Image (tube, grey):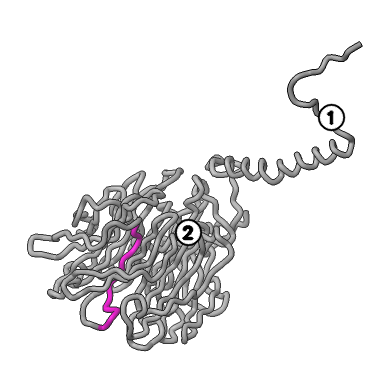
Amino acid sequence: MTEAIASGPDPVPPLSSGDRGRSRVTSVLLVLVLVLPLGAWAIVPVLPARGPGLLETGSVITGTDDPGWELETVIGGRRSWITNVQVVDLDVDGVSEILACDAGENRLAVCRRNGMGWAVETLADDLLAPAHATLVDLDGDADRDLVVSLLGNIQPDDGVVGQVVWLERVEEGYRRHVVLDGVRRVADARAGDLDGDGDQDLVVAVFGYARGEVLWLENDGKQSFTSHRLLSAPGAIHVPLADFDGDGDLDIVTVVSQDEEEVWGFENLGAGRGPERFRSRRLWFTHNHDLGSAGLVPTDFDGDGDLDLLLPTGDNFEYRYTYPQPYHGCLLIRNDGDWTWVVEPLADLGGTYAAAVGEMGIVLVSMFNAWHRHDAASVLLVSPGSGNRRLARVISTRPSHLSTVDCGDLDGDGRDDIVVGSLHVSPPFDRAAALSVFINRTKHRDSNSVRKSER
């Protein structure tokens, strides 16, 4: 009998027992390597914000509202996007005001205390997501101008949407000029005479998203600026200027938080043109790319005559809900001279997003704490001390979602008060307020103690 010849591909021979074993091992490995991580990535950001099962892997600082600090609401709001607050004397009349960048309303506002209330005035509007404002006499005419950094979009965006805007002080208010355009999201711009020619230059942190940079804008004396790139990296947040090495000229530091978690310094060499005037140095980095660097604040913490740096760590924007982590808090980057820096932990606070220096100590605020807990701290005061014996205490558990803080005398009693701003990106919203002030009514430094609950 003639056998029929089948058309098509050759039939697959049956698997041997050894082949079947190897196939099962391969399937298990694929599940472990691909399926489980992808599933976790998809599930974790959308876990419920309340109730049992919430992931709290870090220490949650808890406490009660300190009666020595009187809370006042300056601007209310359930969903606010306050990106920066500063205590300034805008009118040079000896009375402090609050300068606030409001990315929700796309405006720059000034808040003045009026008896027991507050008056809020819009200095400039139609500013797309302002991130920071610098008070400086940019044109040398003996009045105070404002240089405003614009993100262009507060949401993640790698488009060319950022700007630096100069608000020139004139008799009728402010005249607007665009100093820098055609760049990605701008998070900060600071002013100082970097080349010693008597005019104010600018340093700009272009945060971007996947691409960013640090720029020196050299002023030609007529407010025309030449841009020099000092660093190419995404995620530059702040660019403080100061004489960090004591040689009489202004240096630059910045924190980079996107691809890497790093602090960079740019030593002013006192000579050279363009970027050659600065020597770049990486002052610190970590292999923990989830650290969440959120800013950089210069201060002489140890009183030795040079400027140290405070680095808040607690940015959790990659998650939809808040997850305090064990590495959240604030780092002290101590200046030991000759561009040598030593890093040590200053304080723990889940979701720490900003720090400010006051006469009473270091104030930290949390944006990403465990807000489903009503005793979770939003404002923490760290008193100066030595070693790991520094005293920290809770000032308040409200408002929540605090993104910015500053200290200064707002009621004219000669003592520092605290101003905070909120940036609400996720629930709960039951302790919401856009801009708030804590008036210092304390009679002594001792107050409510800090309690730590390990989760």
Q: Is residue 306 above or below residue 157?
A: below
Res 395 visible: no
Residue furthest toward the front? 2
Given residues 320 and 3, the one toward you in this image is 3
The amino acid sitting under disc 2 is Gln
The amino acid sitting under disc 1 is Pro
Magenta residue span: 185-196
Q: Is residue 426 above or below residue 277?
A: above
Among the two numbered marks 2 and 1 on one chain, the one whose residue lies closer to the N terminus: 1
Q: Which mark is residue 258?
A: 2
Total marks drawn?
Answer: 2
- Label 2 neighbourhood size at 10 Å, few (<14), some (14-19), many (20+)? many
Q: Residue at x 42, y 54 (%)?
A: 209
- Name which quarter of the figure residue 148 lies in: bottom left
- Name which quarter of the figure residue 236 lies in: bottom left
- Name which quarter of the figure residue 294 lies in: bottom left
Mark-to-mark CA distance, 2 and 1: 52 Å
Given residues 363 and 149, the one toward you in this image is 149
Q: Position of residue 240 (x, y in %)?
A: 36, 72
Q: Which residue is mark 1?
A: 13
The quarter of the image holding the N terminus is top right
Q: Is residue 423 left or right of residue 312?
A: left
